[in-house]
Image (spheres, rainbow, N blue to C red):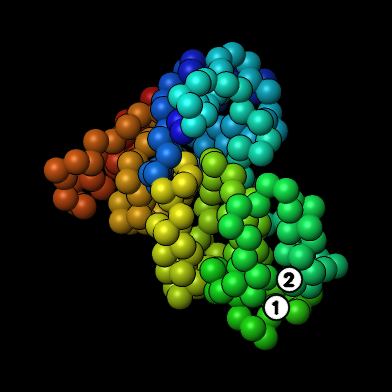
Amino acid sequence: MKLIVKNVKKSFDKKDVLRDLNYEFEQGKIYGLLGRNGAGKTTFFNLVDEDLDLDYGEILCTDNNGDTRALVPEDVGYVLSTPAVPSFLTAREFIKFFLDINRDRIEDKKSIDEYFDMVGIEVEDRDRLLRDFSHGMKSKMQMLVNVISSSSILLLDEPLTALDVIAAEEMKDMLRKIKDKHIIILSTHILDLAVTMCDEIVILNNGVLEKIEISNLNDDEIKNRVIDALKDENKEA
C-alpha cells in the first residue's frame, strides 16, 4: 500500500501554509515528519484524516492490487498530541466497547488483557476510570484503539512526548513490531527520536515536503542535514 500526496495546497486567511506537497509514503516504513512550530505538520495530518478540506490537489492510496483510490475513514488512524478518550469509562470498558462496535473489521482478535499487554497498561490500571489516567497513559489508550482497528495509515502527532522513559521505549518497540502492516508517519520535535526510530525523514519546509537522504550517513550527518533544512526555512520565513 502507498499513501500518495499530489500537489496539495492549503491556505488560511490568505497565508499559504502548504504550498505544493508531493510525496509517496510506503507501507512497512516509519516516517519522521519534522518542521518548525507552525510549519503545517498538524494541518497536513488533518487533511489526510479529512478533518480539513483540500484547497487543491489529491490525497490517494493504492490498494493491495496496486489500484489507486480515494481514502476512506477506515484507512486512517490518528493519534492526537492531546489524547481524547471517554473519561467516564474504565480502560477495560473502553476497549470492550471498541471491540464490540468494530468486531467485523478487526483482524486477529485478541483478548482485552493481551491488548493491554501490547502497550504496557499495568494490571492495576485496567479497571480504573480513564479520567484518572495520566496524559501518557491516555496516549497509550489512543494508540491502542488505532492499532486494534488495523488502520493502514497511522498518523502520530508527537506521540511520545508525554511518556516516561520506560513507556516511550515500550511504545517504540510496539511501532517497530507493527510497521510491516502500516504506513506510520510520526510528527516529532525530537530530532534524536526521528534519527533513531524512523526509516525515512521528511522535512515540512516552506510549505513543501523535502526528503532527507539518510542512506550511508551517520547520525551526526543526518542531524546536520535536518538542522540545515530548518535553518533555511527560518531564513525564508
The label on residue 126 is 1
- Disc 2: which residue: 91
Q: Is residue 103 left or right of residue 141?
A: right
The label on residue 162 is none
**Residue 236 appears in which quarter of the rendering?**
top left
Residue visible at 39% across and 44% down in the picture: 28
Q: Secondary structure at mark 2?
A: helix
Residue 45 in the image: above or below residue 236: below
Placement of the C terminus among the 4 image quadrants: top left
**Disc 1 + disc 2, Cβ < 8 Å:** yes
* x, y percent for residue 121: 60, 75
Residue visible at 64% across and 83% down in the picture: 123
Front-lying residue, 104 or 41: 104
Residue visible at 38% across and 44% down in the picture: 29
* x, y percent for residue 118: 54, 69
Q: Is residue 28 left or right of residue 153?
A: left
User: Visible in this render: residue 171?
Assistant: yes
Residue type at mark 1 is Arg
Q: Earlier in the sequence, mark 1 or mark 2?
A: 2
Front-lying residue, 204 or 215: 215
Residue 104 in the image: above or below residue 209: below
Residue 93 in the image: above or below residue 12: below
Front-lying residue, 106 or 216: 106
